[in-house]
Image (spheres, rainbow, N blue to C red):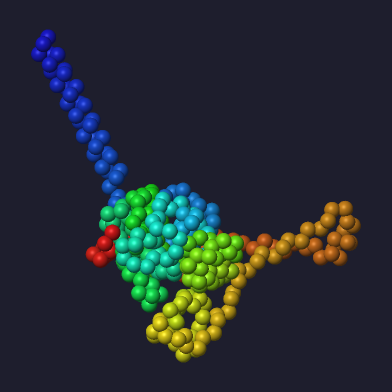
Amino acid sequence: MREGALGMDLSIKRSVLIAAVAALWLAGCSQGVPPHMMPVPSAAKALLAKKGMRVDAPIFVRIFKQESELEVWKAKADGRFYHFKTYPICTWSGKLGPKFKQGDKQTPEGFYKVSARMMNPNSSYHLSFNIGYPNTFDKVHKRTGDFIMVHGDCRSAGCYAMTDVLIEEIYALAREAFAGGQKAFDLHAYPFRMTAANMQRHAGNRAAGFWRDLQTGYQAFEVTRRPPRIDVCERRYLVNVSFKNGAPADPAAACPAFEKLPIEAIPRRPALQQARTGLPRSDKLRRGTSRAASPATLGQGASFGAAPAKPSLSGFAFRTNSRLGQ
């Protein structure tokens, strides 16, 4: 009896051990996809489909400090960008206003560009991408610092920090846009939504003059839904201009002759004319009540631009840049 009980006890222990090993193996398999290769979540794909957006269409990103929000916009077939989703920023450091120097723990404000080589799949902050600070404007103002990121881990010392789940989704959207052919996406970092009321509220801030230049870029996108062209001369931003004899070589020098680019505002939907009830049919016809056809949503069920739809590149990965730092 004693030997039989001992054998049964060992058998139970062996079964428990096998079950534990199997559970660990299955857990490892489910976590086998590295964070930078996580697919776009199914809920995000469903929202993209609902809004008539291609997964691999170009993106545009806006950041608002005061509101602690990061927006992702997606391009459609008309070349304009449409709001996809707003993500809460977990934390950012410093205060409203631009970054000035290395170590001030201040998050930058300005107009930046992010290329594929600026994506860091091996970040110590889960995932990250470099926003491109210092840009030409920052450098001409002798602002210092580097490795300013949007990253995960929900902690910041001069960066914009997201939760790990959210940075995975944003990173995946950027990865797919690069796979679809986008060379770099624009990232505009603002102190707040640059409405007239907010500008008036912060008119006494020492950064107010700098913010007026940022507001020009903000308003340009609000009107056109296209990221504006940005140049720097006379140590300031110029938005949507064309230089008559080539772009300025020296961002500190006087601006060469330029002209403003024409503004192509977002087309407004035609108002649907409604006939008042109770009017005779002849009156309805005289009042021109024929209904205009509702325009189809651009980009729905169609490939982006004129090219056929490109499949998402499974296994697309970025070259690790040893200088990304974080």
Please state if 222 lies on the left or on the right of 166 as rendered: right
**The N terminus is located in which quarter?**
top left
Q: Residue at x 59, y 74 (%)?
A: 264
Where is 210 relative to 85, above or below?
below
Which quarter of the figure is the C terminus placed in? Answer: bottom left
Instruction: Please report the residue visible at 42 percent of the width from the left and 66 percent of the height from the top.
Output: 98
Total numbered circles: 0
Residue 279 location, x and y as percent? 88, 56
Q: Residue at x 26, y 42 (%)?
A: 28
Question: Relative to the observer, which residue lies in front, 301 or 208?
Answer: 208
Along the line of sight, which residue is nearer the eye, 71 or 288? 71
Left or right of 42 in this view: 32: left
x, y percent for residue 182: 41, 68
Against 303, is 136 above or below?
below
Residue that lies at the very extreme toward the left in this rendered image: 3
Residue at left offset 35%, top offset 74%: 142
